[in-house]
Image (spheres, rainbow, N blue to C red):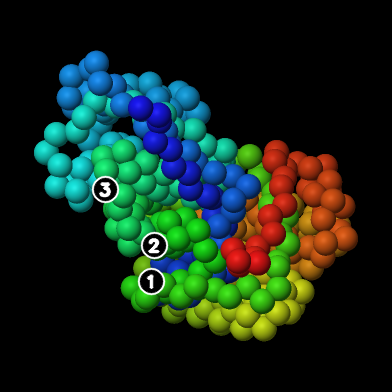
Amino acid sequence: MPAITSTAPGKIIIFGEHAVVYGRPAIAVPVNQVRARAAIMAEPKKPPGEVFIDAPDIDLKTSLAELKEAHPIKQAIIGVKTSLGISNLPAFTVRITSTIPVSAGMGSGAAVSAAVIRALSTFLGHPLPDEEVSRLVYEVEKIHHGTPSGIDNTVITYAQPVYYVRGEPIERLFINRPITLVVGDTGISSSTADTVADVRRAWEANRTRYETYFNRIAEISKNARIIIESGDPEALGPLMDLNHDLLVEVGVSSPELDSLVETAREAGALGAKLSGGGRGGNMIALVPEETTSFVSNALKDGGAVKVFTTRIRNIEN
């Protein structure tokens, strides 16, 4: 029997990170240049229930039984088992690989979960619908992030640009004209759970100040949606700059992120900001097509450990 495989994209948040945790809108898009992949191979000669996990990128080779109960991969597998009402799993090996940077704000954990959940449910003969995949990924995200916003599981499961407000129906974002972004990775790992928790403590200590920050970020996200859907992506640049400045005030930037953001602007980017949890991870720069290579090279020279370009568009485009 051939292996059953599934992949899931990474993601970047263009506008609204951190504020989205407090009910404000955010805009996020899939990044297909980086992906997680899960391949499941039946092991008919092994006893039922003997499940082996092979994840070389994180140096993990172990049986399901030996993993701690709170391990995200174990919870993804248990989630599928529970959702399908299966009492005993057949024997199989799941091999997990990913090109998505870990702890860099690109949804690596959610992508791995989505790939595993889809591959396993298909292997078991009952492919789960998107809504259930997203729900199960969200449950696993609680392990990664404590109080996740729900944006990672949503944009990665549906692999579509989304305008997301926590607790409200998903709104697919219409991309009138393609948007070109250069992504620069600081190479610094940062725990989203930790930054979210720190922001929570700061918000609790000074709610008036932080509610003002979040309200201003919300207005940026709302205006950005109008601009994106009207087909004037160049006008997003100043909004990205303003969003970054507010995230600096929120306390989630870092000297490395600030330096790369400034480098991108000086190299000709229309705007730039951190993306994701912050304090490391990635920044993004909005660029005209003709300056893509110039901005990319400037970011490499400025210390980014990885730089790539992604073009955001509707799938049918």
The CA distance from mark 2 to mark 3 is 24 Å
Residue at horizontal 67%, vertical 83%?
A: 230
User: Vertical placement of 265 versus 293: above or below?
Assistant: below
Q: Residue, x 70% and y 66% (percent of image)? A: 179
Could you tell which of marks 3 and 1 lies nearer the N-terminus?
3
What residue did someone put label 2 on?
150
C-alpha distance separating marks 3 and 1: 29 Å
User: What residue is shown with label 3?
Assistant: 126
Q: Nearer the viewer, residue 257 or 41?
A: 41
- Label 2 vs label 3, nearer the camera: 3
The image shows residue 187, relative to residue 19, as above or below, that is: above
Disc 1 marks a residue whose amino acid type is Arg
Q: From the image, state whether disc 3 or disc 1 is nearer to you.
A: 3
- In what element is the residue under mark 3? loop
- Looking at the picture, how far across and down is residue 124, in whole percent? 26, 40
Q: Are marks 2 and 1 in contact (CB under 8 Å)?
A: yes
Q: Secondary structure at mark 1?
A: loop
**Residue 203 in picture, x, y percent from top left:** 41, 68
Please tell me which residue is depicted at 14% across the width and 47% down the height of the picture.
85
Give the residue at x 62% y 83%. 226
Q: Which mark sits nearer the N-terminus, 2 or 1?
A: 2
Q: Which mark is residue 166?
A: 1
Q: Secondary structure at mark 2?
A: loop
- Image marks 3 and 1: residues in contact by CB distance under 8 Å: no
* Quarter of the rendering occupied by the C terminus: bottom right
Q: CA distance from mark 2 to mark 1?
A: 7 Å
